């Protein structure tokens, strides 16, 4: 094969027909490998399947090496999912409790303000009654 820069000793093209045919075959083989590599890189579904198979193999290998760790991790994932589902289902109840608590605080504050006004009014009436005596 000739050098693309044109500065090497491969600059001289072979004149022997057998050497030329061998060079052509070598170039064809190299081009075929390049095309195969490019087509495998562009085949997204096959690459996804390879990745899934690799992940599965890794999981199986990990399980074979230490089953309790894998079972523990699986149990933790299940527990986390259960917690999330439970929290979602009880969200409305928690919101209602918070709202009731806010309303109770507001009602207590209003009641306290009303009682304060009543106490002041009674105190004022007592003072007026003392003065009138």
Image (cartoon, grey):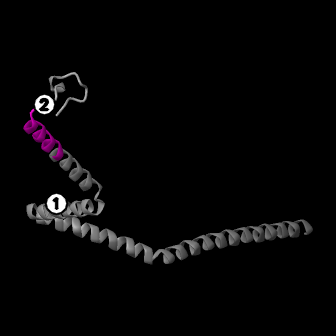
Q: Marks 2 and 1: which is nearer the front?
A: 2
As helix, strand or loop, the secondary structure at mark 2 comes to loop
Residue at the extreme right = 132
Task: Tell me the crowding category of disc 2: few under 14, some 14 to 19, or many 20 or more residues within 10 angstroms, Cα based.
Answer: some
Quadrant, the N terminus: top left
Res 82 → quadrant: bottom left
What residue do we see at 67% from left, 68% from top? 109
Q: Which mark is residue 3?
A: none
Callouts 2 and 1 close, C-beta under 8 Å: no
C-alpha separation, residue under disc 2 versus residue under disc 1: 51 Å
Quadrant, the C terminus: bottom right
Q: Which mark is residue 14?
A: 2
Which residue position holds label 1? 58
Would you say 48 lies left or right of 54 here?
Answer: right
Res 14 → quadrant: top left
Residue 91 position within the rendered picture, expressed as x and y whole percent measured from the top left: 48, 74
What residue do we see at 45% from left, 77% from top? 90
Res 4 → quadrant: top left
Would you say 95 lies left or right of 3 here?
Answer: right
Residue 128 position within the rendered picture, expressed as x and y whole percent measured from the top left: 88, 67
Task: Tell me the crowding category of disc 1: few under 14, some 14 to 19, or many 20 or more residues within 10 angstroms, Cα based.
Answer: few
Determine the main secondary structure of the stretch shown in magenta: helix
Residues 85 and 2: in front is 2
- What range of the chain is rendered magenta? 14-28
Say whether disc 2 or disc 1 marks the residue closer to the N-terminus: 2
As helix, strand or loop, the secondary structure at mark 1 comes to helix
């Amino acid at each position: 094969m000739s050098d693309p820069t044109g500065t090497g000793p491969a600059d001289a093209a072979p004149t022997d027909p057998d050497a030329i045919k061998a060079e052509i075959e070598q170039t064809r083989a190299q081009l075929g490998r390049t095309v195969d590599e490019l087509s495998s890189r562009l085949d997204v579904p096959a690459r996804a399947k390879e990745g899934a198979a690799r992940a599965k193999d890794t999981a199986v290998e990990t399980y074979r090496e230490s089953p309790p760790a894998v079972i523990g991790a699986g149990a933790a994932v299940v527990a986390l999912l259960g917690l999330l589902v439970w929290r979602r289902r009880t969200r409305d109840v928690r919101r209602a409790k918070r709202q009731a608590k806010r309303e109770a605080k507001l009602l207590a504050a209003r009641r306290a303000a009303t009682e304060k006004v009543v106490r002041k009014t009674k105190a004022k009436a007592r003072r007026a009654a003392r003065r009138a005596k």
